[in-house]
Amino acid sequence: QVPLVESGGGLVQAGGSLTLSCVVSGSLSSDNFVGWARRPPGSERQLVATITSGGSTHYEDFVKGRFTISRDDAKNTMYLQMNNLKPEDTAVYYCNAQNDYGDDYWGQGTQVTVSS
């Protein structure tokens, strides 16, 4: 069973919005969420935003003010609300969690494509 499953990607025009979701299951819980990363075409995976178990958030400069990371512990779900999307936001987006031993888990990824 895959412990992290993302959804919510798609094709959107520049300036539009999307909300990504990541559901955790199995031996992981919402407390294990770390954040979101993305892999643009032809590039390495890059951090987008993180959230701690206490709810503190961090955003990379290229999404600050446009993206919002959040969690719903009752639903074991982490979200990434993305507003004012730009073509350079086109990427495969991954959610990341870490267990109590420091092992990283990644979802299968969800494609976000922003047309100009």
Image (cartoon, rainbow, N blue to C red):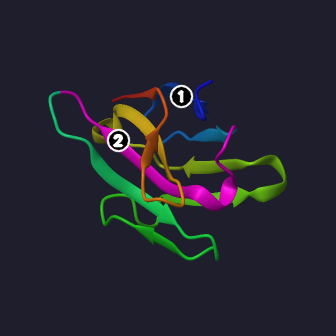
Magenta stretch bounds:
26-41
Name which of mark 2 and mark 1 comes first in the sequence.
1
**Label 2, label 1: how many angstroms apart (C-alpha)?**
12 Å
Q: Amino acid at mark 2?
A: Arg
In percent of width and height, residue 6 lies at 57, 32
- 84 vs 77, nearest the viewer: 77
At 49% across and 33% down in the image, what residue appears?
107
At 81% across and 47% down in the image, what residue appears?
75
Residue 45 lies, with reference to residue 61, above or below; the image says above
At 45% across and 29% down in the image, what residue appears?
109
Local SS, label 1 = loop
Q: Residues within 10 Å of mark 2 (few under 14, many from 20)?
A: many
Q: Quadrant of residue 62?
A: bottom left
Residue 64 is marked as none
* Quadrant of the frame with the N terminus: top right
Mark 2 lies on residue: 38
**Is residue 38 magenta-colored?**
yes
Q: Amino acid at mark 1?
A: Gly
Mark 1 lies on residue: 9
In percent of width and height, residue 101 lies at 47, 59
